[in-house]
Structures are given as structure tokens and as C-alpha cells.
Amino acid sequence: MNRINQLFLDKPSGIMSIYFCAGHPSIHSTIDTILTLQRHGIDMVEVGIPFSDPMADGPVIQDAATKALKGGMTLRLLFSQLASARPAVHIPLILMGYLNPICHYGYEPFFARCREVGIDGVIIPDLPFSDYLEHIKPLADRYDIRVIMLITPETSDERIRFIDNNTDGFIYMVSSAAITGAQHEFDAAKQAYFARIDHMQLTHPRMIGFGISNRQTLQAALSNSSGAIIGSQFVSLLDTCPDAESAIIHLLDKLNT
């Protein structure tokens, strides 16, 4: 069974997922970061493919991607690093990246290589759903890779149900239509959005991401979904802390106090 599906079967709630950009803070730090997160009990890791125009990302992740690209990180290098590390990594791994580098790599070679190196799912924020159905889903199904789709407060109920019926793994609930970045709390409008989606009783589990940076936002996410996805807050800590170990300890302390 795909490790993403297995995770949600084994742990229906309270899941913690962390995002960081491959090649940041250094070209050789990616695998150490994954192993460090696993050691500290993180349930799932999203590894960002650095791209020069990450339109859904805020300044923190944009800066990390820029540094990674300048440092020499490429998709091919990332795949080679992941291949060597997978035997020691037992948690689900998701690649999050934009369509351009994946298209340049080649759709089928990309999904085939994901399978080879032990990637369990991919998130492609700028992938049109029609292209997903026609070109990507057949390949993802062939190689047992889950394509995770995003929904926002502006996504209609009809489209959400369509996504629920045509994807697998989990649904990524973006907390707002804005770019990524830390938020102090989720306001009444976001809470209403969480409640609306909960009342839809979707088939697939949901994870909430974008803006989770403290105890308040974490608890709100955990109360309204199967778990939380934390990105910008951890990425910024990788810049200010001496290593991934210090960064995740600092993050977990902030989330629990």
C-alpha cells in the first residue's frame, strides 16, 4: 500500500507534516533534514523542488528556492540524493513543485523516477485539473504516486467534490487564497471555511496548510482536519538555526507553548 494511504489508516488524526525546499540551506543538507524530521516524530515530509517563479509561495520560501538554485540544486540531483537515502526513511515523502521543471524532465520519466526513489506523492500547485485528468493521472496511477490537489476558501463545493472523487491520498486545504507565510491566528472567515468543508463529509482525509506557525493555528488545523502542514516557519528557522536539529526543536517548542 502507498505510504500516504497507510499513514492515514494508522493515524487518522494529529498528523504533522513539514515542508522544506531541497538544497536549502545547503545543497547537501536535504537528506539530513528529512532524517532529522523523521527522528523527531514528524509523520510526513514535503520536499520542495526549487523553481525560479514559485507563484504560490511567500518571500520566505521564494528566498529558500533562490538560494537552492544558486547552490546548484536540480531535480536530477534531488532524485539521486533521495535514492540513496530512502532505505533509512520510513515516513511518506511528497515532492512539491511547479509544472515547468516537471515538464522539462518529462512527465513519464518524472513519475517513473519518483517510484524508483520512493516518493509517495506529488503536489503541483499550477497543474490544471483537466491536464491532470488527461495526462498526469494515468501516469501517477501506473507508478502508484498520489497527486495531491489543493483547495482554498474560494473553491466551490462542486469542484471540491469533483477533486474528492478523482484523486487519492489526501486533500490539501489551503487556509487562505493568499501566498504561503506565517499567521498569528485563523480568523472567523477561515474557521467558517474549515467548518464548511467538514460538513461536506468528503471521502478523503484533509490536511490544512499555509499560515501555521504557533499553538493557536496548529490547534485550529488539528481540530478541523487530519493534520497540519507547516512550511514557512520551518524554512525560516533553517536560515537562523545552526542545523535542522535545532530548527525542528525550536519549531516544536513554539508550537507547543
Image (cartoon, grey):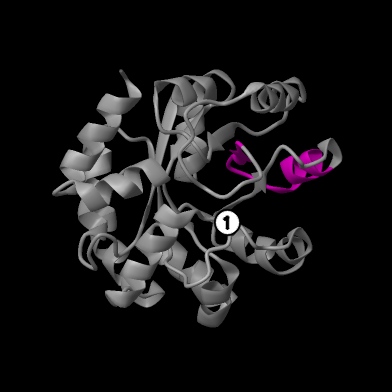
Report x, y in % for residue 97. Answer: 51, 62
Left or right: residue 192 compared with residue 5: right
Left or right relative to 220: residue 90: left
Tell me which residue sits at (70%, 21%) in the image. Answer: 195
**Which of 100/255 is in front?**
255
Q: Nearer the viewer, residue 214 or 15?
A: 214
Which residue is rendered at x = 24% and y = 68% of the image? 27
Left or right placement of residue 242 versus residue 207 in this view: left
Bin the neighbour count of mark 1 within 10 Å (Cα to Cα): few under 14, some 14-19, many 20 and up.
some
Please determine whether, in this image, residue 255 is positioned above or below residue 241.
above
Q: State the residue lying farthest toward the right.
A: 158
Tell how many labels: 1
Question: Toward the viewer: 180 or 73?
Answer: 180
Q: Which residues are magenta?
A: 159-175
Residue 139 position within the rendered picture, expressed as x and y whole percent measured from the top left: 62, 66
Where residue 222 appears, x then y in whole percent? 50, 22
Q: Is residue 170 left or right of residue 192?
A: left
Q: Amino acid at mark 1?
A: Ala
Residue at left offset 34%, top offset 25%? 255
Give the quarter of the figure containing the C terminus.
top left
Is 164 part of what is drawn in magenta?
A: yes
In the image, residue 55 lies at what x, y percent?
58, 62
Of helix, strand and loop, which one carries label 1? loop
The quadrant where residue 102 appears = bottom right
Observer able to see residue 36: yes
Q: Residue at x 41, y 33 (%)?
A: 213
Q: Is residue 57 magenta?
A: no
Viewer-nearest residue: 8 or 48: 48
Residue that label 1 marks: 56
Q: Is residue 40 visible?
A: no
